[in-house]
Amino acid sequence: MRRALLGFTLALSMVLAGCFGDGSGVIEVEQKQPIWADYERIDPQAHEVERMFVTVDLRTNESTNTTWAVFDASYGGNCCEHYLATDIDGQILNIGGEYPVFSTDRGHIWDTYIPPALPDQQCRTFVPTNPGQEGLGEGSIVQATNGDIISMSWFPYVGGDLKLDKFYAILYDESEGEWKWCYNRITEPFYDRSWQVEVIGPIDASIGSGEWASIVVSNFWHQTQNAGGQISVDGLNYYPFQFPGRDGGDPPIEVDLNFTTADLPAYWDVNKPHKEMRAFPVPSGGLVFPAYYNNGNAAFMDTSLEFNELSIQFPSEYCQIDRSGTIHCVANQGTSFVHYMSVDGAVTWVNHTYDLGDRASSIEEWEFQGNGELDLFVLNVRYQSSDGPDVDTVYHVRGYSEDMSPDTLTYIGQGDLDSTSGAGNDIRFDFASLGLLNDGGVVVAYHDSTDPDPLFAVELELPA
């Protein structure tokens, strides 16, 4: 009942918030029955753990329970997080812990790739994790636009007396149908959870050539030092690089980002990096870091892996291009979010505001993703509620090309646990994580009192 009332209040605030352009107009949507009247269960096979989560229809202000499969830290997570992704075949990927864990059947059967304790002749000498140090690793994973799956796993402070961080590059080679790995030693004192993104090729750079490049940045370095990261043209051998200064100075260049008439492959709906990478790949080649320079301009890494200042300004650091060529950006200020959208290459923008109002005292974590094939946008917000506990939510926007306002809000989990990101906290939920399956189902991380570690849920009921 409490959540139904919250949903009703939210629906009113959403109507008052406005929609396109300057937000001065309200889109009237007629709907005689709630959206779930057309829902079907997408997976008829029962899961070991299924839970009912409250879903509010924001058009009719009605609420119901929808079914989600739930998975704990043993399915690729760790004490504090999951790093979720999907591929174009509907595979769920997770490397919240040490090694990639994946399921091709919506979570009924899971496999794990663990690098064998043998030297890989393509790479440097293998240095295994010290006995007793198992469980400390954490990584990142994303499918590249040629079908490869690029990932890394970081192991902190192992290697005997040297206590060097260990970086294992782990690659699924689509052309050969097999997993590969490479040990890359990192000499810096602390690396931390990685963010990872593809640089669209063909790449021709001083470190080599390839179909794409992979950038991995440390959460610790990226957030506190802007010190650069690791870059590879084969997904196995990584080399350090530095970011340019924020002041810029070189004449800005122009890059055409209008891909709405292009026939982009399905990979563009799954290759979105985690938002904290603060970058997105460009279909014509390269990588954009929105709002990078102090003057508001973006940074652009070209196919020679050189940085340029880009004469385009984005409304946020957090952006994505989906398969339709639509650019999505999301900005957060206080307890409000603004979803910006451009269909002409970042020349003009429309927007919609999500205002959590007095329901939230602060925002804990959040993530978003668009799917151009399905005309679907999803926003995941974990907020500190005004009455104490953290609340996990998922907004669905079905048909964003016609109406940017969300049609449903789902409360994921019980919303009865207060957690905080960062080492040293007793109850941790370090970051939001989200993926979209090719049928539109959401895979999302959350945390409540039913488990000591963060969980993730897979949506089972979808519009027909």
Image: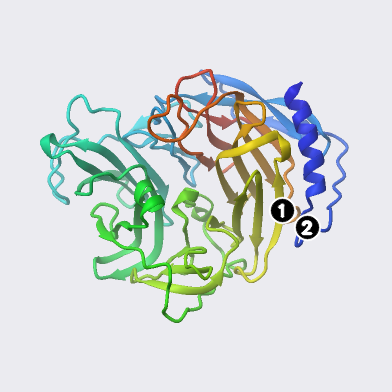
Are the two marked residues, 2 and 1, in contact with CB atoms closer than 8 angstroms? yes
Quadrant in the picture for the N terminus: top right
Residue marked by disc 2:
23
Residue 108 vertical placement versus 350 (above, below): above
Q: Is residue 302 left or right of residue 404?
A: left
Q: Residue at x 38, y 33 (%)?
A: 423
Residue 411 visible? The answer is: yes
Q: Which mark is residue 75?
A: none
Question: Looking at the picture, how far across and down is residue 143, in whole percent?
Answer: 42, 49
Q: Residue at x 36, y 54 (%)?
A: 225
Question: Looking at the picture, how far across and down is residue 26, in whole percent?
Answer: 84, 53
Residue that sits furthest to the bottom in the current view: 251
Question: Looking at the picture, how far across and down is residue 237, in whole percent?
Answer: 23, 54
Question: Looking at the picture, how far across and down is residue 241, in whole percent?
Answer: 29, 61
10 Å neighbourhood of mark 2: few (<14), some, or many (≥20)?
A: some
10 Å neighbourhood of mark 1: few (<14), some, or many (≥20)?
A: many
Q: Quadrant of residue 34?
A: top right
Label 2 – label 1 distance at C-alpha: 7 Å
Q: Tell which circle, 2 or 1, labels the residue nearer the N-terminal end.
A: 2
Q: Which mark is residue 352?
A: 1
Residue 35 visible? The answer is: no
Mark 1 element type: strand
Mark 2 element type: loop
Tell me the amino acid under the disc marked 2.
Answer: Gly
Q: Residue at x 48, y 39 (%)?
A: 431
Q: Residue at x 49, y 19 (%)?
A: 451
Depth order, front residue of 370/187: 187
Residue 1 vertical placement versus 138 (above, below): above
Q: Is residue 410 left or right of residue 382?
A: right
Depth order, front residue of 99/176: 99
